[in-house]
Image: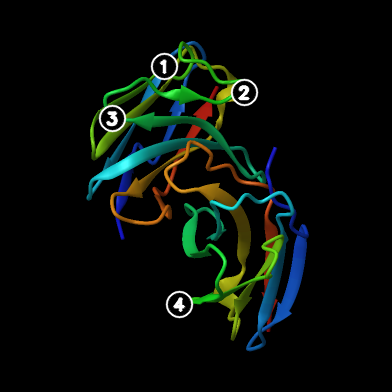
Amino acid sequence: SAVISQKPSRDICQRGTSLTIQCQVDSQVTMMFWYRQQPGQSLTLIATANQGSEATYESGFVIDKFPISRPNLTFSTLTVSNMSPEDSSIYLCSGELRGYTGELFFGEGSRLTVL
Amino acid sequence: DAKTTQPPSMDCAEGRAANLPCNHSTISGNEYVYWYRQIHSQGPQYIIHGLKNNETNEMASLIITEDRKSSTLILPHATLRDTAVYYCIVRVVYNNDMRFGAGTRLTVKP
């Protein structure tokens, strides 16, 4: 298994600012996924991040708004840019371990409130 | 769109088996069936997965029909701590396609 740590666990931000969420894994992972979860809703995939290549974004999510970095096999960041109250949500990262058959491990999420 | 269909909610008595169904009628031959659960305010937790054979681990059993168009997750002796939203997902391993549907909200009652 793997332990995934996210920072910050929660934050309150002002409209128009940007926040970077960090995701650290204690093992090497092949693929990393970033999700958004609105209150009472399921998880929505934002993008898939592979080391050494550009992230792949889902429909409705763009790189200018949610830039992602993946500098190595154990770390990734998601930035929420130019935030508005509609960006208030829980953001989760997950990783798929090398050598496993596709099961993902998740962080506990970063709860973001935009005023 | 999610590739799976699950009932929105289910109840189960504590100590009884919880049987959670999932339909995935368009599943491809190389897609696995994965189950996750999310307890309130926590990140999703992996439970079990399978390709075509039934699987069992310390948490649950997974029964996949012969045609692979549906599956059932079985929690053999549900406890109050099993109250959570359960998600069924079909996916090709190492594919950029890990999408969650609405899931089933399981409530285990004393």
Q: Residue at x 62, y 57 (%)?
A: B88
- SS of the residue at dot 2? helix
The residue where tag 1 is placed is A18
What is the basis of the colouring in this image?
rainbow
Mark carried by residue A77? none
Badges 1 and 2, same chain: yes
The reply to whether callout 2 and callout 3 are in contact (CB within 8 Å) is no
Host chain of mark 3: A
Q: What's the residue type where badge 1 is placed? A: Ser
Q: Earlier in the sequence, mark 1 or mark 3?
A: 1
Q: Are marks 1 and 3 on the same chain?
A: yes
Identify which residue is drawn at 59% across, 84% down. B76
Please state the chain letter of the residue tagged with numbered disc 4 in the rendered image. Answer: B
> Can you give x and y, in whole percent of width and height, for residue A104 in the image?
42, 51
Residue A93 x %, y %: 41, 40
Instruction: Find residue A51 and name its label.
Output: 3
Q: Residues within 10 Å of mark 2 (few under 14, many from 20)?
A: few
Residue at coordinates 40% horizontally, 23% vertically from top-left? Answer: A55
The answer to the question of whether label 4 and label 1 lie on touching residues, with beta carbons closer than 8 A, is no
Q: Chain of mark 2?
A: A
Quadrant including the C terminus of chain A:
top right
Q: CA distance from mark 4 to mark 3?
A: 32 Å
